[in-house]
Amino acid sequence: MIFYDIMVEYELEKSVQSESEDINEQERRIGTRMNKNLKVLSLDENFITAYVYAIEKDKFDLAVSAKAEIQITDVWKLIKERLSDSMNMSCKLKKAEEITVEGFRSIIVEGDSNNLLRSERRILQMMKLDYNDNCTFKLEETMYCQKKQGVKAAVKRANELMAGTDYLEEIKRIYSKENMKQFYGHPVHYHISAGNEKSMKAMLELLILSLHNNKRILSGRVNHIVELTERCYEERDFENLIRSSVGATVVLPMNYSDESEAEYASAYSEMFQYVGKLIKKYHRKVLFIFAEISTKKGYAKSMIQEVGDELRIVELSEGTGNRQMAQKILCKLIDDSEYKCLRDVLDEERIPQQDFYKLSEIYKYYEEWIDQKIYQKAYKTYAIKTTVKITEEKKKGTAYEKLQELVGLQNIKELVEQIVAMDKIQSMRYEMGLVMQRNAMHMIFTGNPGSAKTTVARLLTSILKEEGIIRNGNLAECGRADLVGKYVGWTAKQVEKKFKEAMDGVLFIDEAYSLVDDRSGSFGDEAIHTIVQEMENHRSDVIVIFAGYPEKMKQFLNKNEGLRSRIAFHLDFPDYNETEMVEILKLMIREKGYLCSDEALEKCRGIFAKAVLQEEFGNGRYVRNVLEQAMMKQSRRLMSVMTGKEISKEQIQQLLPEDFDVAAGNIEKKRVRIGYDLCNV
């Protein structure tokens, strides 16, 4: 159905008018009589309904709905003939405007309040338009501009939006002279993928305008279902919505926000079937567009599979452009906005330097520009600072201090300093109104067992939280078993779940090389592919750290070409030498509340000098093993010689050289596999 708001000028024969009657009552009586005569139209096979909702001395307004295929000129012709024949009335069409269903409902309510209609609720129920208060879906109606637009203008606009090749080709197909410029039904429907709602709206607007100009759709009205729950199949309101959209467009959301993915999979299955059944039923007369925001989880694949066997669906995606194109779009957005007066000549330089840009990113820059200009120019008491004092404060008793106490790892400590400094400088740039660039901080840690990879990951997470670089201190630690599912379809969801756990924090994937399988298309490959995709989707929300042995991590990086390009920092954790291992031992001894003589430390130096000659000797874990065995031997020594005697605090703390005659020190005779982690200190 198509809905109209029509204004009519009229003139009555003298015999119809009454000079003694109050003018307002006379107008109401005439309007009521017109509605009585127009009621016959609703029974006509042309499916036209018309109601007078407002009337004055020489004009009245009509709320009209008509079958989509009927031209507005024919609609008016039938209304005019009915009024002329039944009321001796001459009428002249002043204005006819297509409106949304919500607009139609509102003027029907106005007619009821003007005492021209008996019951607006009964009318809406009869027309099956009382679905707007349904809680199983939320609807936003838009009436897109129906101006004239040729193929050159459409292609130019598509290029201005940096639309993808598939989108540009579809615009050309729509305008092709091989098509008949008459509506016979919908040959295709669409699946549009965009980065955010604003870029989605821009792509939709051009598509709808192009289709309407070529009579591929009869109405400029778009019913955008912004939220669809799994219970929609329990009521008829959703089908009434679809039925009222004949000749128009329905946009279906392909994203969800359920907390439990397992519940989502089962609960939505009936919804898929129900909505799919309606799409198949109405697909010739209603244009369906599956709208997917690429940065959000969704059920596009499941929904499209439900209808794909009967419908031909054209995939349309957001494209990319260079910096010059991005600057041009930003300038146009500014010039077309109410904030144009706040623009500076160098505002386009706010676009950060990168290889390519998406339309969704430019809309994000535009929103940031508005926010800054409001308090920079419109309200100067909140103006941007021109100078900022640089201060450097080292926090005591924090993760930063603990990191500095770790033995060695100078390159890691320097990187942390750089990250913290970069964030502070970017914050200052923001205060000055300059471009604030958040660089990707994904990392790879390579090193042998016990080289403090996990320890540093945990401390780094805490430091980034303390410095405000990440919003919370989430650290999601995982390995292959946490990422690879046992059955088809599980792996991607498990990876997505881990990214969700690490949101606004750090995802630490230990022994990442274990995801590499010998055969292609395995669950491990699916995990790696999904990790790369999620790194892109959450590049500003999650920092990913991969960890593993140096040689094996090379195989991991070579498995997916997208991995290496997304990793900003490659940090190597070298094996410790005997001097560093003694320092680690001293640190562990102090933190555990023990004392150790110089002679005992020298004995340990000899043990460590032999250990470092072995491959994968355990590093910090080996030191821990030596210390814990010495603690046990000291305990046995004290119990054997001090039983029945008083023991001092110094004696119970002191570790002697003979306490270090431990199995871990006999590394040449027997290799000891260490399973402890330095991070538990």
Image: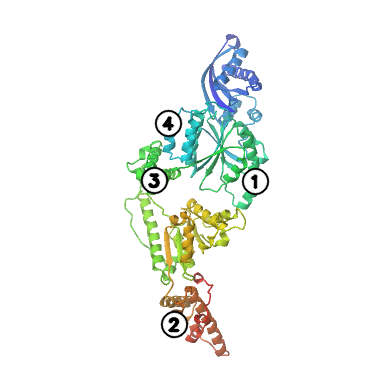
Q: Name the secondary structure under disc 2.
A: helix
Q: Quadrant of the N terminus?
A: top right
Q: Secondary structure at mark 4?
A: helix
Residue at which label 3 appears: 372
Q: Residues within 10 Å of mark 3 (few under 14, many from 20)?
A: some
Is 288 above or below relative to 180? Answer: below
Residue placed furthest toward the right: 234
Q: Which residue type does callout 3 highlight?
A: Gln
**Mark 1 and mark 3 residues within 8 Å of each other at the beta carbon:** no
Between the residue at mark 1 and the residue at mark 2, the CA separation in whole angstroms equals: 67 Å
Q: Tally the marks.
A: 4
Cα–Cα span, label 2 and label 4: 82 Å
Q: Name the residue beneath numbered marker 2.
A: 606
**What mark, if any, has residue 152 been given in the picture?**
4
Amino acid beneath label 1: Ser
Mark 2–mark 3 distance (CA, rounded to whole Å): 63 Å
How many other residues sit within 10 Å of disc 4, few (<14), some (14-19) or many (≥20)?
Answer: few
